[in-house]
Amino acid sequence: MSAQLAQYLLSGLTIGAIYALVALGFAIIYNASHVINFAQGEFVMIGGMATVSLANAGLPVLAAIPVAVLAAAAVGLALEKFAVEPARGASVVTLIIITIGASILLRGLATLVWDKNLHALKPFSGDRPIELAGATILPQSLWVLGVTFAIVLALGWFFGRTLTGKAMLATSHNPLAAQLCGVNVRFVLLLSFGLSAALGAVAGILIAPITLTSWDVGVMLGLKGFAAAILGGLGSGAGAVVGGLALGIAESLGAGYLSSAYKDAIAFVIILAVLFFMPSGLFGKKSAERV
Amino acid sequence: MLEVSALTSHYGRIQALAGIDLTVEDGELVALVGANGAGKSTLLRAISGVQPSSGKIIFNGNDISGVRSDRRVRLGIVQVPEGRQVFGPLSVEDNLRLGAYTRTRAESDAELERVYAMFPALKERRGQAAGVLSGGQQQMLAMGRGLMAKPRLLLLDEPSMGLAPRLVEEIFAKVRALKAARTTIFLVDQNARAALSVADRGYVLETGRVVLAGSGAELLADEKVRQAYLGL
């Protein structure tokens, strides 16, 4: 394997892991409510921006990160409580438009609370590149990959092993039957927004030292995460991870071998291709039910 | 145990329940029969709190009309819904565990053994996805899931629907076993003869109204019931 290819793959995996986290956020909310939450990117922005501003205010980064994640989760809960829940019973399209409105509001608030400048977060453990198979990788990339891996494992445990996680899956499959089992589906919806927001914030914090962060960083990361979710199959956890990594690698290879000018276009070409040729994505469920 | 009075419910502008009054006593098996669209399922959904309704629902002396559906499950009102509604992608055991969502882990463990003893076929398939079970097994699973919640009042909606006669027989044998164990049951079934035969009492529902009430044997002998629902 050429060193160049190894380099593209490593940087593709890094950004792909971020897309995967964002895509998981889309998947969790989609499963709970069939809503595509277009404010998902703003959680990414809030995570990065809040960490930067807390760090600038003198808080050690290790303390700033959990505060920023909790802040983003609180915004997610508030979004559900005050914007989505009052409109329950409305059509899914209406709810999606509400999330678009919320994303515009959150970006506006971010320019008021913070500013319109680019901000850098210091890498967690220095910025001396590490040699790997002829290519180099930043220590921050290892953080991105490691934390993403840990989160995927934790989510796998939560949805596969805990009753609360299974109740969330059950609710996504059949809300009526879940209610009849005594699951409070409104709580499930609230939990899904909090969890997705926290995931988005973690993605935003991890990537901030590599790509900088600003008030509008969520627009592109949100759309890329959405593309990854579509590619993997909306609502599939495994699909979100595979879709994210695949999108990141495709982008990185495209930028390397074709032209870096097309980097952002690749995600959208992929969305179109998936929607045209396999609308349920790589891992999307084919609906078949025994009656 | 259950006392429903002047219960009404609508789907949009269409009235599905036009003032229902009925009672279910402790330990009784009460059957509800009626044609398709008479409002049977709507009534059960209103009792479970998953269908908006007005009127009074008294359970064990408490007015639960405004109580959320998940709280009603905690109170012991458990419904096995029409059409099974199992969680297809989840395993049989996960489906059962979710039935005990409102209970402690220890209670869930103990109940699981009882349900497996009652439905041995489920134990054999505990690791399989619920969606691949046959229709009859899915019905057993739906009943098992309901029992996991430890119902004080079990609402059974069309448990024999779409099943082969041998399986219908099996389902009703389970219903009789539950009755023998003093579970209070409110049973809706289109198989009016089977439902009324196992029931202590029954109600006949027509276009959202109770038009006839009596003991199971009385209703089975009633000329109108025989013509309309038993095809005699």
Image: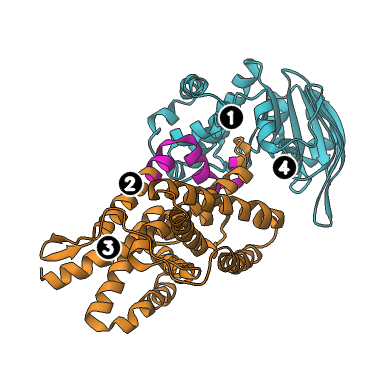
Chain colours: A orange, B cyan
Estimate the spatial distance between the alpha carbons at disc 2 and disc 4, rounded to whole Å.
46 Å
Residue nearer the viewer, A135 or B216: A135
Residue nearer the viewer, A134 or B183: A134
Residue nearer the viewer, A247 or A144: A144
Q: Which mark is residue B102?
A: 1
Indicate the amino acid at tag 3: Leu
Magenta residues, start to end: A155-178
Estimate the spatial distance between the alpha carbons at disc 1 and disc 4, rounded to whole Å.
24 Å
- Quadrant (top left/top right/bottom left/bottom right) for the C terminus of chain B: top right
- Circle 4 is placed at which residue position? B41
Residue contact between numbered discs 1 and 2, judged by CB atoms under 8 Å: no
The verdict on a common chain for dots 1 and 2 is no
Identify the element where label 3 is drawn: helix
Q: Residue furthest front?
A: A58
Mark 3 belongs to chain: A
Mark 2 belongs to chain: A
Where is residue B64 shown, x and y percent of the image?
A: 78, 31
Mark 4 belongs to chain: B
Sequence-first tag of 3 and 2: 3
Question: Comparing marks 1 and 3, which lies closer to the viewer?
Answer: 3
Could you say which quadrant of the image residue B101 lies in? top right
Could you say which quadrant of the image residue B168 lies in? top right
- Circle 3 is placed at which residue position? A13
Indicate the amino acid at tag 2: Ala
Left or right side of A71 for B202: right
Indicate the amino acid at tag 4: Ser
Estimate the spatial distance between the alpha carbons at disc 1 and disc 3, rounded to whole Å.
42 Å
The verdict on a common chain for dots 1 and 3 is no
Q: Is residue B98 above or below residue A21?
A: above
Where is residue B33 shown, x and y percent of the image?
A: 76, 36
Q: Is residue A91 above or below residue A174?
A: below
Where is residue A204 shown, x and y percent of the image?
A: 42, 60
